[in-house]
Image: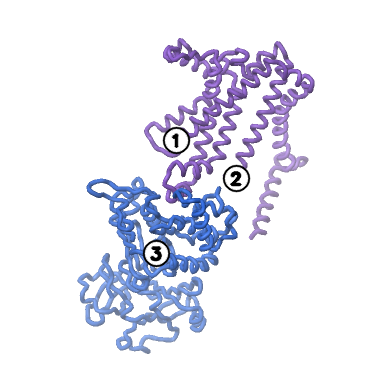
Amino acid sequence: MIILRNVKKSFGKKEVLQNVTLEVPKHELLSLVGPSGCGKTTTLNIVAGLWRPDGGAVIIEGVLVDGKEDGHLIHVSPSRRKVGYVFQDYALFPHMTVRGNISYGLKSRHLSEQEVKSRTQELLQFVGLPAHSEQYPAQLSGGQKQRVALARALAIEPHILLLDEPLAALDPRTRESLRIELKKMLESLDVTSIFVTHELSEAYAISDKIAVMGAGRIEQVGHRDEIFSEPNSEYVARFLGQNVYSGKVIDYSSPRSTIEINGIKISAGNAGDIDNDSVLVTIRPEDVVLSSDLKPGNLKWDEVAYNNLQGKIVEIVRINSAIEVTVDVGFPLRLTMTATSLRELGLKEGGHVSALFDVDSVRISPVGESASS
Amino acid sequence: MCFSTVRRSWIIKSRYSMRLQQATGPHVSGDALARIVLWVPAMLFLLFIFIPLVAIFLNLDLQSLIGELRNSQVTNALSLGIVTSLLSTLGSFAFGVPTAYLLATRNFAGKKLMDTALDIPIVLPPAVAGLALLLAFAPRGLLGPSLRQLGFILPGSTLAVILSQFFVASPFVLRSSKAAFENVDRKFIDSARLLNPSKFSVFFTVTLPLAANGVLAGVVMTWARAMGEFGATLMFAGNLPGVTQTMPLAIYVLMAEDPIASNVLSAILVITSFSILGIFKWLSSRPSVLP
């Protein structure tokens, strides 16, 4: 179990960690995701004991490793924390062979030569590299290096495992196949782990539990589906790539309220519990559908509870296998669809379409507070 | 894309040579001019350095070489030079490497000052260094009386030779090692610290091996400098055959008395320096780690 409580860290005047509170239950794997420079690596380095926090507490397996106890400042040295750490570009010792790298942590632990040898062999088997044991890191591929780094970290039988963007140094093709492989290995290990990445899709693929980090703080922690469906702040909604607008409630009627965004009126659910006219509106791209022949009036949107906005397609972008379309409906509305639907609808940039979305998919929240649907 | 880059550079090149042609007249093309401007000074430079070195060897024949190796003044200077330079290099290593590590990894008040002070011998004229050592450690110098009480009278002793060489040559190992330690990527040390509880062990298994090329290059430069030390040794240690007379001093003295002996010693020093330079070049061109 890893617990961080109000951890703070500054480098000079730059406050890198404002206040990080996070908990990873025993044997669980948590993905820590956030944009570059938000403090993910700093968090890992503090958990590992490589850096001392300026304030707050770190607890590993019930032991306070950083923080104050009876007025004394505690700092347990990195090697005594039994932390396995896979660095971003692996940091394999370039002057040692694969075997030398993997056995490094064992040699300093007063084990017999025989024990070191058999344990190293076991780890070589686990990561599938017995044939490469006498090679140097410079002779290995990116994927092989990553596996050596994992084996080296696991050699000391760590209580916790920290992985800092272990897939980022690989080319996109290898990355996808290694992601699956890495996930399998991590699942078989049963070690409390933190997996750091700046890519949402990677976090989603690796673990059930995700923590979203923004500028020195944990913004939201939860099950991956919960995070995608219920982002608790503007920051998380934007990070997830959702449409975020500032709007104004102009009609509080129940069960349908009316909201104005950039002069355009849309319908949303009950706004009764919101006492401020200014609201934050989020619409998920996957909740919006396009129609090329639906004119207003063809559909009674009071009955079917659909918003129907006319607009012009301003951009069509392909992201891997999905298509992202931006429609100007008075405000830019982003949505995703499959390549097949794009082709079937015959949509082109500059074309006029109707954008439809459910009243209930419009989420409104008071500005600066957490959202409610 | 590759093609267009090639084309573009070709166009630039031809435009450039056109302009040069206009400037220098029609007879000398730009390429030919560039060739002259670059190669002529380089070749003259090389000849100026190389001819004196060749001269040393052209004057020698094998017989006189073997004969001089029986000359006790020559052999004394040779063995004294090798022994003292090795000892001063060892001392430079023993003091230089920890100091380099301190300067490379710790922050403390007066660090810049210390760093600069330790560099002074590199720019100090050796004769001044010798005088400074005399004023500090000679019997009537700053620390002379206390040293005498301890039984040390430095001027005229072999120890003074070693100290002179140390004074002048140790900054090389310090410089080079400091740069080498600074260049060791922090992440290697961090990953070692997580796996290995002993800081000493981390230093000897990871930090030092990764800095080894730089440290060794510094050691080699220090050795070469120590072996060739002349001014400071002459001023501080003196010129006593068998006690303080190293190779450069013997070369100077023998030049009048026994030119062939002087020549033989010079040839030996040239060969040694050349080998040292070779080792240095090899060390600095080698990738930072094996293989």
10 Å neighbourhood of mark 1: few (<14), some, or many (≥20)?
many
Where is residue A221? Give x, y as percent.
Answer: 33, 66
Q: Which chain is blue?
A: A
SS at mark 3 in the image: strand
- Marked residue chain, label 1: B
Q: Residue at x 52, y 68 (%)?
A: A177
Same chain letter for marks 2 and 3: no
Q: Residue at x 35, y 57 (%)?
A: A215
| Three-letter residue code for mark 3 | Ser
Image quadrant holding the N terminus of chain A, namely: bottom left
Mark 1 and mark 3 in contact? Answer it, CB < 8 Å: no
Where is residue A235? Give x, y as percent.
Answer: 34, 64
Where is residue A200? Give x, y as percent.
Answer: 42, 67
Image quadrant holding the C terminus of chain A, namely: bottom left
SS at mark 1 in the image: helix
- Cα separation, mark 1 vs mark 3, equals 39 Å
**Quadrant of residue B1 within the rendered picture:** bottom right
| Three-letter residue code for mark 2 | Pro
Where is residue A335? Give x, y as percent.
Answer: 42, 75
Q: Which mark is residue B103?
A: 1
- Circle 2 sits on which residue? B287
- Circle 3 sits on which residue? A31
- Cα separation, mark 2 vs mark 3, equals 37 Å
| Three-letter residue code for mark 1 | Leu
Residue A326, placed above or below residue A6: below
- Cα separation, mark 1 vs mark 2, equals 24 Å
Q: Which chain is purple?
A: B
